[in-house]
Image (cartoon, rainbow, N blue to C red):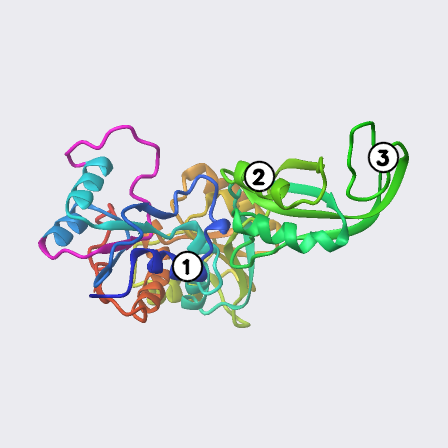
Amino acid sequence: MSKLRVADIVAALERRAPTSHAARWDPVGLQFGDPAQPVGRLALCHEVTEAVVDALEASPVDVVVSYHPLLFRPTTRLVAGATVEGRALRLMQAGISLIVAHTNLDAAEGGTADALAEALGLDANEGFGPVEPADSRKLVTFAPAEAADRILDAVVRAGGAKIGLYTHCSFRAEGTGTFFAGEGTVPVTGAAGALNREPELRLECVVPVGCEEAVIGALVHAHPYEEPAYDLYARRAESGLIGRLGRVPPGTRLSDLILRVREGLGDPPLRVCGAWSRPLERVAVIPGAGADFLDLARRLGADCVVTGDLRHHEVRRAQDAGLCVIDAGHVPTERPGMERLLAGLAVLGAELVNLLELDPDPWSG
């Protein structure tokens, strides 16, 4: 029996593309399935379409990795039919788990955005385009220095103090805590019936939403004080950057970039805004739908943006700002990243089924 489990695939993808860098609206990770399920056959698809589910029913796998989420919005019913809910039902009935790597893969080093930039020959690429991350909390407590490591260990075991692939992430600052220990108290430091001034550390770390109660319980249990003080704050940080900004070779014109887009992305239908003779120095790329980042790309010095899913008024605004635009389509701009992910999954030890040829692009021309 295979020693590889669904949880191992999830962990491998987490190392490659931490889910903490996904957009807050993006349901990445294990969408459904049993983490303990053995994995002998693994499939990769761009999107779970009817054709993909047909293929998986005809030749079952244990888990499928999809770039586009299947269950994008919360649902209360899984009913048969040509819908996302119907496809989810069919996969569940076939015993197939589903894992999603989407905006976290865009933001990851070597992920979808980097693959697109490299496919177009960009150089010296920089990340840009932060996406709003999932909500999290900042936990702060105050303790004697000798207790800080014990408290932090307890918080980590309860799910806190983690950023991406790093654990035990904290900040510490020295200070002086004051307290008056009233009647009936048994202070760990200082004396009852007096105003005490004690050296302490301010210890702070992040806590994911959903882990607050477990983490606070662990902190209180590990803390030496009779009445430990702590604060829990809402926070927003560690945004993933899903675009890339790089340089093109000297002398490159928009017409040259158009040719490179056709060659690098498999000759997709293009929509181009800008004079083809326009000289270019810096080009921004955003895989998928990048309309939200056109203004930012221009402010950062981009001469042209390559992305997909642009609308008339968005392009007109870009044109008025002096920005060239190449709309190469949603799926084609993501495809280099899918090819790279396929290579990454091939080394995990399961038989790999490539379903990328079942093109999810709804446009036929």
Where are the magenta residues, as a range?
Answer: 58-82
Q: Amino acid at mark 1?
A: Thr
Q: Measuring 48% from the left and 62% from the top, which residue is drawn there?
A: 277
Would residue 270 be seen by someone viewing this image from the given angle? yes
Residue under label 2, please give it. 217
Nearer-the-camera pick, 335 or 187: 187
Q: Earlier in the sequence, mark 1 or mark 3?
A: 1
**Label 1 crowding class (10 Å Cα cut-off): few <14, some 14-19, many 20+?**
many
Q: Which mark is residue 192?
A: 3
Q: Is residue 135 visible?
A: no
| Numbered circles on residues, count | 3
The amino acid type of the residue labelled 3 equals Ala
> Picture coordinates of residue 16 (x, y %)?
43, 62
For the point 13% across and 54% down, the residue is 55
Q: From the image, tell me which residue sits under label 1.
A: 112
Label ID, residue 179:
none
Q: 107 or 293: which is nearer to us?
A: 107
Left or right of 69? Residue 111 is: right
Q: Residue at x 37, y 53 (%)?
A: 101
Q: Secondary structure at mark 3?
A: loop
Name the kind of residue labelled 2 in the image.
Gly
Picture coordinates of residue 29, whole percent (x, y): 38, 49
- What secondary structure is found at the residue carrying circle 1? helix
Q: Is residue 55 above or below residue 347?
A: above
- Between the C-alphas of marks 1 and 3, the distance is 61 Å
Tell me, yes or no, whether the highlighted magenta stretch contains residue 168: no
Label 2: which secondary element: helix
Query: Which circle, 2 or 3, is nearer the viewer?
Result: 3
